[in-house]
Image: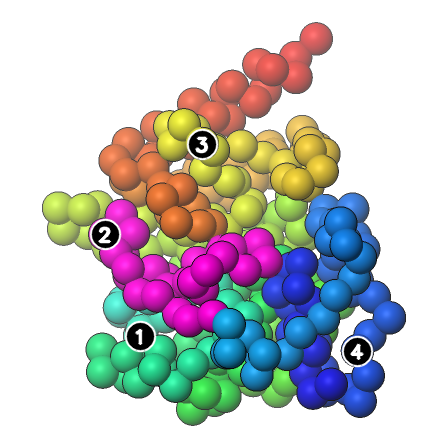
Amino acid sequence: MPYPICETCGTQFAESSVPPAQCPICEDERQYVGWNGQRWTTHESLALRYTLKFEDDGGVLGIGLSPDFAINQRMVYLQTGAGNILWESLALVTDEAVAALRARGGVDLIAISHPHFYASMVEWSQALGGVPIYVHEADREWVQRPSPLIRYWSGDELVLSDDVSLIRCGGHFTGSTALHWRRGGERGDALFPGDALQVVSDRRHVTFMYSYPNYIPMKPADVRAMRERVARYAFEDVYGYTWGRNIIGGGREAVDASFDRYFKAIAD
């Protein structure tokens, strides 16, 4: 089975003649093994059943699988001073999607928030000409398909340009990362936090969980540290991990109110 893909989390593994006995990402308490047990697929099999859709999502270009697959994150395409960025990754890469991205100016780098969204990041990089993939070194152990294309960064901030920074938020995973884009203009700046702080269903707040599917709360010390790390960044919009999970306008205030709400809820 070349480069097996976990059907529950969508992570692509290293090439193997047989699928792995288990998916470490799904065996971890932050994720789960599918109710029908561990199942595997391949990129070629996905291409027979799924397509990629390009749609506006709150003013940014989103890309995702149709129909839904695995965790169902969507990737976003950002044209920034750091170059054209793919934020997050997907399990499926198609020739049509690569051609569509090239028609928009191509991709200069990929950045990923945390292990649940690594997906087929190496496959994407190769299809786009070998662009670098930025992953925080604290989460290196979760990479299932190693590659020299992956650039492990360290510390609490990586400045990619005057307008783009990666912020290590921690909490959900030690290396959980948010992307901050000083977009400027009428739209204002934007935060793309992955699952470090997740936009909730009312789209007026975010929450902080160690495990979202298994409802394990994040440690207060980790939430405090996250608050300190994002405190100096202004942003109007917060783009969540999947379609429509966005706070459009008032994002900074919504995040601050969410931190306050969290600490009030856990107070004695």
* Separation of marks 4 and 3 at Cα, in angstroms: 36 Å
Circle nearer the N terminus (1, 3): 1
Residue 208 is situated, as x and y percent measured from the top left of the image, at: 58, 35
Q: Quadrant of residue 43?
A: bottom right
Residue placed under numbered mark 3 in the picture:
201
Q: Is residue 204 magenta?
A: no
Residue placed under numbered mark 2 in the picture:
59
Residue 60 is situated, as x and y percent measured from the top left of the image, at: 27, 56
| Amino acid type of the residue that numbered disc 3 sits on in the rendered structure | Ser
Q: Quadrant of residue 246?
A: top left
Residue segment shown in magenta: 50-76
Q: Is residue 165 above or below residue 199?
A: below
Asked if residue 249 lies left or right of residue 125, the reply is left
Residue placed under numbered mark 1 in the picture:
83
Q: Is residue 51 above or below residue 263?
A: below
* Separation of marks 4 and 1 at Cα, in angstroms: 36 Å
Residues packed near mark 2 inside 10 Å, few (<14), some (14 to 19) or many (20 plus): few
Asked which secondary structure carries label 1, the reply is strand
| Amino acid type of the residue that numbered disc 2 sits on in the rendered structure | Gly
Circle nearer the N terminus (4, 3): 4
Residue occupying the point 27% across, 48% down: 58
Circle nearer the N terminus (3, 2): 2
Residue occupying the point 34% across, 82% down: 96
| Amino acid type of the residue that numbered disc 4 sits on in the rendered structure | Pro
Circle nearer the N terminus (4, 1): 4
- Number of the front mark, 4 or 3: 4
Which disc is residue 131 wearing?
A: none
The answer to whether mark 4 and mark 3 are in CB contact below 8 A is: no
* Separation of marks 4 and 2 at Cα, in angstroms: 39 Å
Taking the view exactly as shown, the residue that stands out farthest to the right is 21
- Number of the front mark, 4 or 2: 4
Residue 101 is situated, as x and y percent measured from the top left of the image, at: 30, 78
